Amino acid sequence: MLRSRVRALRHGLLATAVVLVVCFVVALFSWLSYSDSRAALTSLTARATGEVVSFADGAVEVRWPTGSARVAYENGDRVVGKQTQIAFDPADPSRAVIPGSDLFLETDRALGGVTFSIAVAVLVLLAGAVRVLLAVRSARAPAVTVSVRRIRLQSGLMVRSWLEIDGPVERWLPVYYDPVLVTLPSPVDVELRGGRVAVVDGVTVYPSGRAVTKHPRGRRLDNPVRPDPETRAPRGLGAQLRVDAVFLVPAPIVGLFWAYLDGSGFTGWITATVVAAVLGLWWGAFRGSDPS
């Protein structure tokens, strides 16, 4: 029972740790970028009203009664000829910004990177904690004997193990993979605790989601009535990571979409791709991917 718990936790903890490390790195670099941009903005203490007179080479030229400056501004041709508020350094008027200029965008993106990383880390930790607490509470509940069949369902990129539970109301319970499931006869009597945690041949199999009363979607594969006891079941983190690797495939596309929306270019694409990749690995572990 303890080995089963350690096996289920180890996969989830590894995926969670990878997400947290990536979130920390993204948050750290985003904070450093935000600090630099914020420091540059705080030195621009003087204010004036002026006009955008031209745009060239990724920067606009702004003029006001006491000075002028070139300000980095993506797509600055949209603001040529318009009046604008200007913040500049009184000791060096050539250092200036206007609303919508690149420095403001970089500051907002960096702050967004910090808040997004923290939000992802908190949600991942919270989801994992809730899943563990529910499983532990169910494992302590009284046991009832039920007849189950182990099935595998593939829906999209996800392949999961389910226990099909007989009774007055037929139910399907998703469970985390354990090698004992591979050679489980179909049907077989098992102990069910709290309606969620199954004890199979002395091995505790934990739920990877809530039980449902409607047959889950996906391509179904049933365990044999009498599986070959010599069947070699996949074991270890290597087998889990190989099946979870399929969730890395959409990551570059997600990164490209994010970079397009955010306008953050190659750096934004790399960052979003890495975050999407580790979240994909975590999602596979959280949902209970089945390497068998």
Image (spheres, rainbow, N blue to C red):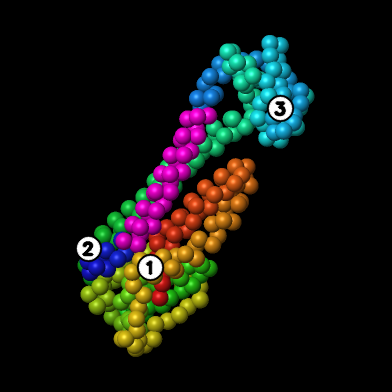
Question: Is residue 11 shown left or right of residue 94?
Answer: left
Q: What span is colored magenta in the figure?
A: 10-37
Q: Earlier in the sequence, mark 3 or mark 1?
A: 3
At horizontal 36% and vertical 75% (from top left) the residue drawn is 234
Residue 238 location, quadrant: bottom left
Amino acid carrying label 3: it is: Val
- Is residue 12 covered in magenta? yes
Q: Is residue 137 visible?
A: yes
Report the residue that reaches farthest toward the top. 66
Q: What distance separates the C-alpha of mark 2 from that of mark 1?
A: 31 Å
Amino acid carrying label 2: it is: Arg
Residue 18 pos. (x, y %): 39, 53
Tell me the number on the disc at residue 238: 1
Q: Earlier in the sequence, mark 3 or mark 2?
A: 3
- Is residue 254 covered in magenta? no
Q: Residues within 10 Å of mark 2 (few under 14, many from 20)?
A: few
Using the image as rendered, state which of residue 160 and residue 83 is in the foreground: 83
Question: Is residue 120 shown left or right of residue 92?
Answer: left
- Mark whose residue sits in front, 3 or 2: 3
Amino acid carrying label 1: it is: Gly
Q: Main secondary structure of the magenta part?
A: helix
Q: Secondary structure at mark 1?
A: helix
Badge 3 is on which residue?
A: 60
